[in-house]
Amino acid sequence: MPTPPPDSLPPIERLRAIVAVLRSPEGCPWDREQTHASLRAGLIEEAYEVIEAINQNDDANLCEELGDFLLQTVFHSQIAEEAGRFTFDDAARSICEKLVRRHPHVFGDDQCADSAEVLRKWDDLKRAEKGARVESALDGVSGGLPALLHAEKIQKKAARVGFDWPDAAPVIEKVREELAEIEAAITAQHPEHIEEEIGDLLFSVVNLARKLKLDSETALRRSTDKFSSRFRMIEKAARERGLVMEEMSLPELDALWDEAKKAMADQTCFSKSKG
């Protein structure tokens, strides 16, 4: 039976040694069976758990989740090393070199006036390194991103070449315009057109959040969490009163919703007064 690598090792080296043992013939059957492809879902899940810890301002959980996310990097590197493709050190060396290379205003004599210029030069250096011909200002945005984040990144790319609203006011008008077009599409009973117009509305709302320097993904998640909290409150209230939600009318459910909304508002006021 393998013994755990000693805790006298530097933590990152101990982690790498543990993963190597888990992947060895004497290790864990599940760990040995994993491939880059089989770990994709876990990688995404761990990334979202890191984000959740950040959203909750939970440092203890964030520390734990960052460790889980680090495991993903070590695990993928171990799989690649076993196949003779690359090692963890190769991956670390690559990002070190990239950070130095793409920060000539820090590690060289280049100058950048602000963060916007930093981002423009980063994109220029990235294209030059990859030898990619510039066909569009939108090049380099991954199609695998979540839809809200993908929309925001596309908008930011377009804005860097001046294709952008001057401020939030015309974007608000655009949101109103898209909503009117949805209503028209619904009246016309055209399903494909409705989907297109809803997509346009979502794109415009992301644009509005961006102009207000807000993260649309965070805003939507917080609203979803708020809805979930209120819904759980009305479920609890219904149970305590011996009511079955499925048998209640919409006005009755709305009344419980209003109670939950007021209760949450009171809790917020109480928390602020204590602070």
Image: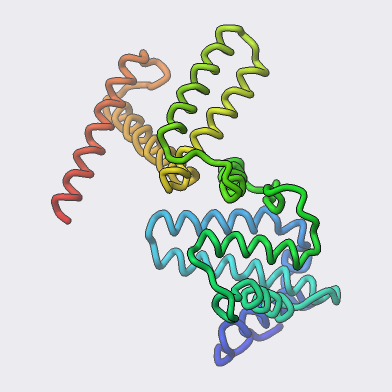
Q: What is the x, y in percent for residue 60?
A: 41, 67
Residue appearing at x 27%, y 32% in the figure? 261
Which quadrant would the C terminus be assigned to in this image? bottom left
Seen from this angle, which residue lies furthest bottom? 8
Q: Is residue 249 left or right of residue 104?
A: left
Which quadrant of the figure has residue 234?
A: top left
Relative to 141, say whether 266 is above or below: above
**Between 269 and 171, which is closer to the camera in this rendering?**
171
Give the residue drawn at x 69%, y 50%: 142
Where does the image place residue 180, in percent across and percent down from the top left?
49, 17
> Residue 211 vs residue 152: left or right?
left
Q: Quadrant of the N terminus?
A: bottom right
Q: Position of residue 13 (x, y in %)?
A: 63, 85
Q: From the viewer's perspective, is residue 207 above or below residue 135? A: above
Image quarter for residue 79?
bottom right
The image shows residue 250, relative to residue 148, as above or below, that is above
Between 4 and 226, the residue placed more toward the observer is: 226
Could you tell whether 38 is left or right of 165 in the image? right
